[in-house]
Amino acid sequence: MKNIVKQAISFILPITVLIVVPWCIEDHISIKHATSAWIGILLMGLGLYVMIITISTFIRIGNGTLAPWSSTKKLITCGIYGYVRNPMIMGVLTVLIGESITIASVNIVVWAMIFFIINNLYFKFYEEPDLEKKFGDDYRTYKKNVHRWIPGTKSFQPNAN
C-alpha cells in the first residue's frame, strides 16, 4: 500500500506540468484545425506512451518513482534508457508540443521551452552529479555513451565498453 501511495503522489509532477500549468496559461482552449488536432493528438499519444514505458521501468527495474524525492534505487541503463538518459522528460515535452499543436497555443510552446530549460539546468547541476555520487563509474560510463536528450540509434550495452 505504501508503494502505491508513493507512486500516486509522484504523479503530481506530470499532472501539474501537463494539465494544471497549460490550463492556467491558456485563456481559451479549443481545437482550431482538424489536421493540426490529429497531429497534436498523435504526438500526445507518443509522449504518453514514452512516459508509460519510463514509469513502468522506474517501478519494475529501478524500484522507485518518477519523482526526485523518491528516485530509483538502481541505475537504469536498459530499455528506453539505453537510447537516451531522460526519456520521461522527452515524453512530457512531446505531450506538451502535442497539446500546443492541437489547440494552436504559443503559450504552451513557451511553457515547454521553460520546462526544458529548467530540467536541463536541474539535470546538469543537481541530478547528474548526484547520480555520479550514487552510482560512480557505472553512471559516468553510461553518461559518456548515452546522450541526455537526443536518442541514439544503438542501445547502450554496459559491458560492451
Image (cartoon, rainbow, N blue to C red):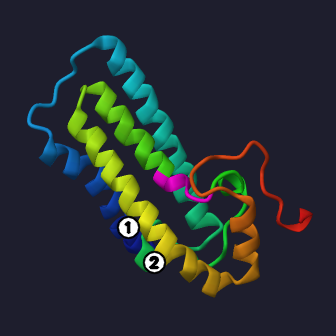
Furthest residue in direction right, as rendered? 160
Residue annotated with mark 1: 10
Q: Is residue 60 left or right of residue 10?
A: right
Q: For the N terminus, give its image quadrant.
A: bottom left
Q: Is residue 50 left or right of residue 95?
A: right
Quarter residue 159 falls in: bottom right
Furthest residue in direction top, as rendered? 34
| Camera sees residue 131 | yes
Q: Is residue 123 left or right of residue 146?
A: left
| Camera sees residue 2 | no
The answer to whether residue 97 is above or below residue 139 is above
Residue at the location (43% across, 69% down)?
122
Is 56 in the magenta?
no
Q: Tell me which segment is drawn in magenta.
A: 85-89
Mark 2 to mark 1 CA distance (whole Å): 8 Å
Query: Camera-side residue: 75 or 118?
Result: 118
Bin the neighbour count of mark 1 within 10 Å (Cα to Cα): few under 14, some 14-19, many 20 and up.
some
The answer to whether residue 75 is above or below residue 28 is below
Q: For the C terminus, give its image quadrant.
A: bottom right
